[in-house]
Image (cartoon, grey):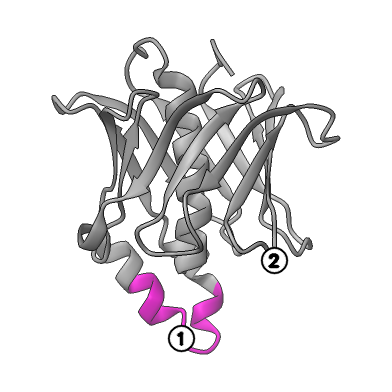
Amino acid sequence: MKNIQFPVQFTFKIGTLSNDFLVEDAMGNDIGYVRQKMLKMVDEVVVYDNDLKSNILFTIKANKWIDFSATYTFTNHLGQEIGRIGRKGWASIWKARYEIFDEKANQDLLIQEENGWIKVADAVLSEIPILGLFTGYLFNPSYIVTRPDGTEVIRLKKQPSLVGRRFLLEKLNNFEPGEEERVILGLMMMILMERRRG
């Protein structure tokens, strides 16, 4: 997953019991297929090279049972740890906030939801009959990934749709060594966690 042509799109599959989504680059090429293993005591996500699930590229696994403070480790196909992601405690109650760490456990990236009010409006209006069906068109959260110095690296934005199934990933800056894989894996896991939260 290097030298990817941006923008990248995450498209969730509809009609499956698991949280599966396809990752495509700007040219429409498959660069990954993400499958969250269901009914496991510890969260585990597998990233394949395509939707045929031919080869495993990465695994993302929680360090403990499903928990508010769990961190998720990224491992490549050779079994090497290349980083991890964790929710930033109580700061994530209002606006989603996650930290991405490198392979040496240094926090090098931060994911933040850009507008917490979108989540609130979506939650409130989705409870209203009929109107709730259209919140996927009206409220589309976006998330920004920054370095510790505030440099914006990438933005992930939900695209308008009835069932919240498409997300667009736009590159805002050049990657430093190792960042590209960590950023994309971190956003994959963050999206799965945020969809579970509602």
Q: Please tell me the numbered disc located at residue 39.
A: 2
| Element type where label 2 sits in the image | loop
**Residue 126 sits above or below residue 92 on the image:** below
Measured as percent of width and height from the top left, residue 71 is found at: 40, 48
Compared across the picture, whether 116 is left or right of 81 comes to: left
Q: Quadrant of the N terminus?
A: top right
Q: Nearer the viewer, residue 99 or 9?
A: 99
**Residue 25 sits above or below residue 128 on the image:** above
Whether 13 is among the magenta residues is no
Q: Please tell me the numbered disc located at residue 127.
A: 1
Q: Please tell me the numbered disc located at residue 59.
A: none
Compared across the picture, whether 84 is left or right of 1 comes to: left
Measured as percent of width and height from the top left, residue 187 is found at: 46, 40
Tell me the kind of residue under disc 1. Answer: Glu
- Are circles 2 and 1 on residues that touch, CB within 8 Å? no
Measured as percent of width and height from the top left, residue 162 is found at: 60, 64
Tell me the kind of residue under disc 2. Answer: Leu
In this view, the residue farthest toward the bottom is: 129
**Residue 127 sits above or below residue 172 on the image:** below
Residue at the spot 25% in from the left edge and 65% down from the top edge? 117
Give the main secondary structure of the magenta stretch: helix
Q: Nearer the viewer, residue 148 or 161?
A: 148
CA–CA distance in space, label 2 to label 1: 28 Å
Residue at the spot 46% in from the left edge and 45% down from the top edge? 72
Measured as percent of width and height from the top left, residue 148 is found at: 17, 28
Q: Nearer the viewer, residue 169 or 145?
A: 145
Residue at the spot 40% in from the left edge and 80% down from the top edge? 125
In the rendered structure, which segment of residues is drawn in magenta?
121-133
Q: Earlier in the sequence, mark 2 or mark 1?
A: 2
| Element type where label 1 sits in the image | loop
Graded by Cα atoms within 10 Å as few (under 14), some (14 to 19) or many (20 or more), the crowding at tag 2 reads few
